[in-house]
Amino acid sequence: MISAARTHIGKVRASNQDALLVLPGAFGVFGVADGMGGHKAGDVASKMAVSVVERALRDARPSQDLLMAAIEEANLLIWEEQLDNPDYSGMGTTMTLIWEDRDRVLLGHVGDSRAYRVRQGQIVQISQDHSMVAELVRQGMITQEEAAVHPYRNIITRALGTADSIEVDVAEFDKRPGDLFLICSDGLSEYVKPARMLDILRRDSLEKAADILLSLALDGGGRDNISLVLAEVAP
C-alpha cells in the first residue's frame, strides 16, 4: 500500500496525545492510537501501544492470532506501567490498525478511533465504536443523529491500559485493487462526516486529501488532537 499520515495538536489541547503507526512493506501496518490521561500520561500510553505493536508485527506474516496477541501485550504493559508510576495513573489509549496481507486486510481495534474503507464510490466504517453512545445506538435507545450531539459521546467503554486484560476486535476483509483505507482518531471523525470524507478521497491524491481532512477538522473547531492515516491498495 501507499500511504499518507498526519497528526496535529489541534487548537485547544496542551499536548498531542495521539500516536501514528506507519509501517510500510510487503505486510504493511497502518494505524492510530489516541491516548488519554493527565499530565503526559496519554502521550505515554499511545506511544507505548504503537511501539509494542510495531515491534511484534514488523516482518511477521499477518495472522489474526498474532495481531490480537500484540494488542493484548500492549494493553498489559501499559497497565503495569501505570501501576508502577503514580504520574501515569488512569492512563489508557485507543488503538485501531490495519495489517495488509497478500489478498486480505486484517483489522485490530479497541476504542473509538475509526477505520473506514472506500471501495467503488462508497465509504463504510469497518470498525465498531466502543463508546457509550455507540452502545445506546446499537440498543436502539438513541438515533445516530442524537448520538452525534450527545453530551457523553466521547466516553469510551474500552481502552488499552485500563485493566490487565482487554477484549480486542479482530476482523478480516478481502483486499481489492484501488481499495482505500482511512484510520483516524475522533478528532477527525467528530468534525468530518463520512460523506465529506468520501468526496475528498475520491477527488484528491492521498497527500492532498490528508491535508484537506486535517484542515477541515481544524476549521470545524479542533478541540481535540487530530490524527489520520490513509493507505491505498495499488490499482
Image: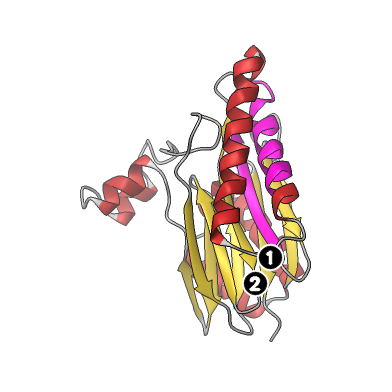
Mark 1 and mark 2 residues within 8 Å of each other at the beta carbon: yes
Eye-nearest disc, 1 or 2: 1
Q: Give how far across and how far down residue 4 sits, in percent.
A: 75, 64
Number of dots carrying numbers: 2
In the image, residue 99 sits, relative to residue 226, either above or below, namely below
- Residue at (58%, 27%) from the top-left corner? 79
Q: In this view, does 128 lie to the left or right of 39?
A: left
Give the quadrant of the C terminus: bottom right
In the image, residue 137 sits, relative to residue 230, either above or below, namely above
Give the quadrant of the N terminus: bottom right
Mark 2, secondary structure of its residue: loop
Q: Give how far across and how far down residue 90 sits, in percent.
A: 54, 22
Q: In this view, does 212 lie to the left or right of 162?
A: right
Mark 1, secondary structure of its residue: loop
Q: Local crowd at mark 1 within 10 Å, few (<14), some, or many (≥20)?
A: few
- Dot placed on the residue nearer the N-terminal end, 1 or 2: 1
Q: Give how far across and how far down residue 64 sits, in percent.
A: 54, 60
- Residue at (40%, 43%) from the top-left corner? 131
Residue 146 lies in the magenta stretch: no
Residue tagged by mark 2? 101
Residue 75's image quarter?
A: top right
Residue 36 lies in the magenta stretch: yes
- Does residue 221 appear in the picture of this structure? no
In the image, residue 14 sits, relative to residue 126, either above or below, namely above
Residue tagged by mark 1? 61
Q: Give how far across and how far down residue 211 sits, in percent.
A: 72, 61
- Residue at (60%, 64%) from the top-left corner? 182
Q: Give the range drawn in magenta.
A: 28-53
**Amino acid bearing label 2:** Asp
- Residue at (50%, 68%) from the top-left corner? 172
**Amino acid bearing label 1:** Arg
